[in-house]
Amino acid sequence: MPRTELRQLQLERLQATVNRAYRNVAFYRQRFDELKLSPEDFQSLDDLGRLPLTGKDDLRAGYPYGLFAVPLREVVRIHMSAGTTGSPSVVGFTANDVRHLAALVARNLSAAGVTADDVIQISFEPGIFTAGFGFHYGAEALGASVMPLGYGNPERQVRVMRDFRTTVLVGTPDYALTIAGAMEDAGLDPHELSLRVGIFGGEPWDESVRQTVENRLQLRAFDCYGLAELGGPSVSFECPQHSGLHIAEDQFLVETVDPVTGEPLTAGEEGELVFTTLAKEAFPLLRFRSGDISRIDETPCPCGRTHARMARVGRHADDRVVVRGVCIVPGQIEALVGSVPGLSPACRIVVDRSSLLERIEVHVQLAPGTVPDRVGRLIQMEAEVRRKLEETLGLPVDVKLGAPGTLPAGAPALEETS
């Protein structure tokens, strides 16, 4: 679609979204009224900048159903974030939203050369996060055969690849390397497999990782980008040119803003990505801050697609880190640790990326003056921290408990080793 027609389509869909949000979401109606704005005031895409940004704190304040724009009886699916920053962000889908998600993911898979003749092995967990189901629905909409294997047991992943002649692997790049390691341990030559395409996301990765994955698994690797709050793995994707990720601009209006001031930036300037949904029924979002730093390129792509591209996300506006597709924020981990009686909230989070499977280790210490009456109590405290962290993150965590003062003052809250 020519960009002039695309902009007109975006305006029409933006006006419909603004009307829906104003009528049905009290949070947005209050914002409009405070600014003395009405939906009729939005006559161009530039008018969107008159609205304040929507942050993740706003979503958490609306937990669980406060930002839904339809009655619960019309919501057919509910997903949420991990909740590492407090209350989780809850996302609802109408039946139409699910169809849109499936069509978008099918579009992304098709751009990577995936067809109805492929066997797609999905290593994202089909749980409360959106990625597993998003890719599942998209693959089915494309007519491909789906193996929703989920996460864990890389030896089983390799066995299924071999026995069922998997042609497409979907997951995180880190886990793809774990599978490659299991394949090598089994003495299996990648040329004996049928793999040809890999779709990877959920964590930052660069060209060196792409080359390693492609060489070890003998496939062509494509990047994808999505956010749980926007409906999952459907926001942007790579085409065969590997020159940025095409944004689904018919579904999402994207801006870049200064991550400190929130002031809009021009296309090409690096800044924080801000998204407005254009077709969501259950959960419309206006100017949602992603926390991800990137830049937008509106120049034509050699592939012929007219949608703008975004550069790979390599860093975040806050201090979060992504491990196996899960966002971890040091401040909220400290809050979880501090909720255990007898422990100081101070902690050190160590993300070990040196092995094929990333590991998280959290060092904690007793609060000053705390003297447990028995060794068993120390073991209980350590186990309680581990349970809280694993329930919140959905990932295994190693916990190391030390005496008061074990963690030096001013020590970094987060360390990454590779």
Image (cartoon, rainbow, N blue to C red):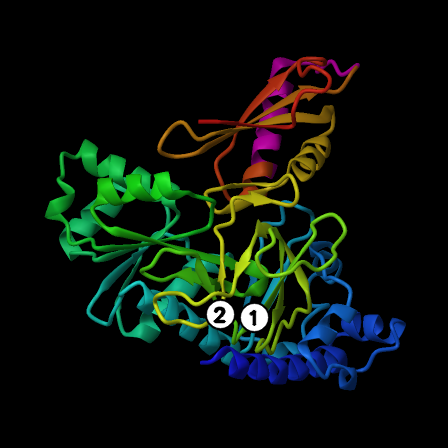
Residues in magenta?
369-388
Q: How crowded is the residue under tag 2: few (<14 C-alpha within 10 Å), some, or many (20+)?
A: some
Left or right relative to 98: residue 412 = right
Within the magenta stretch, is there residue 408? no
Q: Position of residue 160 (x, y in %)?
A: 21, 51
Q: Position of residue 141 (x, y in %)?
A: 34, 75
The residue depicted at 48 percent of the width and 65 percent of the height is 299
What is the number of callouts on the image?
Answer: 2
Name the one closer to the observer, 382 or 183: 183
Can you say which quadrant of the picture contains the N terminus? Answer: bottom left
Amino acid on which the number 1 mark rests in the picture: Phe
Residues under numbered marks 2 and 1 in contact, where contact means CB atoms less than 8 Å apart: yes
Secondary structure under the numbered disc 2 in the rendered image: loop
The residue that label 2 is drawn on is: 248
The residue depicted at 69 percent of the width and 14 percent of the height is 408
Can you say which quadrant of the picture contains the C terminus? Answer: top left
Name the one closer to the observer, 246 or 268: 268
For residue 402, above or below residue 60: above
Farthest-out residue, front: 299
Q: Position of residue 105 (x, y in %)?
A: 40, 68
Amino acid on which the number 2 mark rests in the picture: Ala
Res. 355 image quadrant: top left
Q: Residue 154, which numbered label?
A: none
